[in-house]
């Protein structure tokens, strides 16, 4: 039956591309209020499509910001309910002069469809929607219950996502989330994303005097806030690049043999990784570069400033210096505990004569993890094994995925990222593109995955099936 | 004869205060183009006065910016020619709401004349001018040849001073400069300023990658420009606060026994010095605080920045960091050699993978020094000894005095600062004031000093009489 659906999707290929083309022409830039009409246009475009394909309860979910689009098909009693996540907003297209074709006039070249939002994430969202459409059209139903949820604020940090979920908690309850955003880590090998690092932020300020002091009058005798800041920041890492903060690594779950093997199997060249961006290595010894960025926590200063930073010189001894830092954390850590350790370190290393203020602190998401026997993982593995005839590799993201954490915290459910975009598609940059071949691959994959999930029960998604903190 | 002049000045006291009052009402703010008419007004006010008191060759000296005012009396053949320096421009009066009386309506209260420019430097300039006026009026001549030079750009960094001197080199040639700007270091003890620290500036930038990197994708594996900057800046000083740059102290002339004794005799409380500005001590061990800021060189970072410094957070690994630094140097050092040592240090400490650029370098003035047997020093000592019945203390400025360096470099002559302002008179701040008593003290002092210099010959001011580099 799913084979029929896949045949149907193959036949509908031109229509799918044509619908995606129309979707990409809508300039749904959420970060710029001037595009409010186009955001509205994108919502109506989606509402129409969800109606057309036979979803019910189609509506806008308003949380006080850009509403999300919702539609459902709940005709599979006893089967799991899957929330399909995507977003209809896109990044601004600027700088326009670097685009080889107009960002909102989709242009096909060499098997790639160039347009703002093609890869992030209108293309992959279309893939997911069209699979649901095909199931309903060909078989009159889906292998699982489906709730489509397409938000409009992903590119602005999802400011009202939590509010939308709070207001429509019943409507959005589900057993798991399949995200059309993110997922494929490599064009060469099949991958299953089993989690992401968490994060946390801290901003701190040092004060060494009541005001900037004249370097002629005081130079050589007093503390300088920038010297103190430099010493403090320098104390955060050891010479090799490992974090030198007491307690920072407390509780970190060491990479398992499976994780290290999967990481080693992933096609990755540290040389290329560094060379591509002109960077050089600095990190915790004993781990490969890819392990460092996916399986180990990190601490980076994101911004630091103090004193006179304008043109020319100013002969002052600055009295104030500020730094922003973020951490990426892994399984076994909590953002609060890691930030606590850093604050303790700062307090211990900061001389008593220097006033230290934590000016901002934000404990972000914990690391998320899908265990190897999670039904989402088992299902996607079986699909990829069959589709690619290769054993899929488990990968983890070095970055944090806010929506994954939000769904976990608000609805208590896990998210599998199953987007068919690829890492090289210049998202957020000029000449963003989506591979046309990913439409066929993606619709096959999603059809097989919904089919596989149809073989599970809601109970399998219950508590204890996953280890996300 | 000088006693008659002093008697005359005592009798003229009310007139002097009245003239100063009128001078202070002119809003000659050089930093703000809206005050151009008032700058012009101040010039005409001074030209009129120089004419009135009997100077000749009275004129404006135009170097392309705010013209300086000039007038001369050269009726003492065989005697030294003294250039009397002052400036007619003042700092802006803002913030106006903090003034207890309007800044350009001079207000006498408790023996203090409150007005913008009262201390810096219309009051002290008036003192010097009125002494010349009194000599000419009472005796028909001066003990020395006098060239009055009052610039209009001191508060904007004297941008055309060098050009003015270049254009009017012959007119301005002299044996020495007496500056009405700066000089008295203490209200309690008589002081002779025998020099100032020199200075130099450097700006440098570090690059660790081609662009800012995403801290999720790269965090834990790559160099961070801010971490590198912190390590580099932290390496510039040792734990106690001494400069840890190889070669930085090379050639520094150790403080002489006389200098250390004078410094110790100067009324100075390190506790008060720090407490007044909420600062704390950090500096080269083995020296008192006052020695550190006047007799020893220093190095301060004046500004440092990199990465995201706006509101909120941004999860980047910054690829670039910049710092500005200045040095204060002392006798035996040259700015070039000190900056060379710092550049060598930066190059040695900066990892090969990090790109270091010196983005700006300015070798400022060397330290200036009047030797203990310089005729200016001997003359002022004799005057202060007589006027105060105390042995004057030699002091040095921690700051650099640009005009001193300019006169040295362009005209080859030394400057003695003999202004009668005092350090607590809130220059550049609201409620600036000048002590009325300083008019009597100052005119006596200047009259005695011109008299004493009348006992010297131009030959005594020749080469070899001073050690300024």
Image (cartoon, coloured by chain):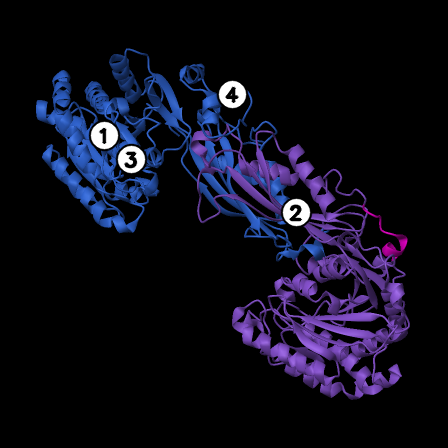
Chain colours: A blue, B purple
Q: Are marks 3 and 4 on the same chain?
A: yes
Which badge, 3 or 4, comes first in the chain's sequence? 4
Which badge, 1 or 3, comes first in the chain's sequence? 1
**Residue identifier under label 2:** A352
**Residue B444 or A154: which is nearer the viewer?**
B444
Which badge, 4 or 1, comes first in the chain's sequence? 1
Q: Specify start and end residues of the magenta stretch as a single range.
A: B252-261
Which badge, 2 or 1, comes first in the chain's sequence? 1
Q: Are marks 2 and 4 on the same chain?
A: yes
- Tell me where residue B125 sits by quadrant: bottom right
Residue A269 in sight here: yes
Q: Are marks 2 and 4 in contact (CB under 8 Å)?
A: no
Left or right: residue A303 compared with residue A352: left
| Residue A242 coordinates in the image, percent (x, y) | 56, 28
Pointer 2 local density, CA inside 10 Å: few below 14, some 14–19, many at least 20? few
| Residue B327 coordinates in the image, percent (x, y) | 70, 49
**Residue identifier under label 1:** A108
**Residue identifier under label 3:** A411
**Residue identifier under label 4:** A287
Which subunit holds the residue at mark 1? A
Pointer 4 local density, CA inside 10 Å: few below 14, some 14–19, many at least 20? some
Q: Are marks 2 and 1 in contact (CB under 8 Å)?
A: no
């Amino acid at each position: 039956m799913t084979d029929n659906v896949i045949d149907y999707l193959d036949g509908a290929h031109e229509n799918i591309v044509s619908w995606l083309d129309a979707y990409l022409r809508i300039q749904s830039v959420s970060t710029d209020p001037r595009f409010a009409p186009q955001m509205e246009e994108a919502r109506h475009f989606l509402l129409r499509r969800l109606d057309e394909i036979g979803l019910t309860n189609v509506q806008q979910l308003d949380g006080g910001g850009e509403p999300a689009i919702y539609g459902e098909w709940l005709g599979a009693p006893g089967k799991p309910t899957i929330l399909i996540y995507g977003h209809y907003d896109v990044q601004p297209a600027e700088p326009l002069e670097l685009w080889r074709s107009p960002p909102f006039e989709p242009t096909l070249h060499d098997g790639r469809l160039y347009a703002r939002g093609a890869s992030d994430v209108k293309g992959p969202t279309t893939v997911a929607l069209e699979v649901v459409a095909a199931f309903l059209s060909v078989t009159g139903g889906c292998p699982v219950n489906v709730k489509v949820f397409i938000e409009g604020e992903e590119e602005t940090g999802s400011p009202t996502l939590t509010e939308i979920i709070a207001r429509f908690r019943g409507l959005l309850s589900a057993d798991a989330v399949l995200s059309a955003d993110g997922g494929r880590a490599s064009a060469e090998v099949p991958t299953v994303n089993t989690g992401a690092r968490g994060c946390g932020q801290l901003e701190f300020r040092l004060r060494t005097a009541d005001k900037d002091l004249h370097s002629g009058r005081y130079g050589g005798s007093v503390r300088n806030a920038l010297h103190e800041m430099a010493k403090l920041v320098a104390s955060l890492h050891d010479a090799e690049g490992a974090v030198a903060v007491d307690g920072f690594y407390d509780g970190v779950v060491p990479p398992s043999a499976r994780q290290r093997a999967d990481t080693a199997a992933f096609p990755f060249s540290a040389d290329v990784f560094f060379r591509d961006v002109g960077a050089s290595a600095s990190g915790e010894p004993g781990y490969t570069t890819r392990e460092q960025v996916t399986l180990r926590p990190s601490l980076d200063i994101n911004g630091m400033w103090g004193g006179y930073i304008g043109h020319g010189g100013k002969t002052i001894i600055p009295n104030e210096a500020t730094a922003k830092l973020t951490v990426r954390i892994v399984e076994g850590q909590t953002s609060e505990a890691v930030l606590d350790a850093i604050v303790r370190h700062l307090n211990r290393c900061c001389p008593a004569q220097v006033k230290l203020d934590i000016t901002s602190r934000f404990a972000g998401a914990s690391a998320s993890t899908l265990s190897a026997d999670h039904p989402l993982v088992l299902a996607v593995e079986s699909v990829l094994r069959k589709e690619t005839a290769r054993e899929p590799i488990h990968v983890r993201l070095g970055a944090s995925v806010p929506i994954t954490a939000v769904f976990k915290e608000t609805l208590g459910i896990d998210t599998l990222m199953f987007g068919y975009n690829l890492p090289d598609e210049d998202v957020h940059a000029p000449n963003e593109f989506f591979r046309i071949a990913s439409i066929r691959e993606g619709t096959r994959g999603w059809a097989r995955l919904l089919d596989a999930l149809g073989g599970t029960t809601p109970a399998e998604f219950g508590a204890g099936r996953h280890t996300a903190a």
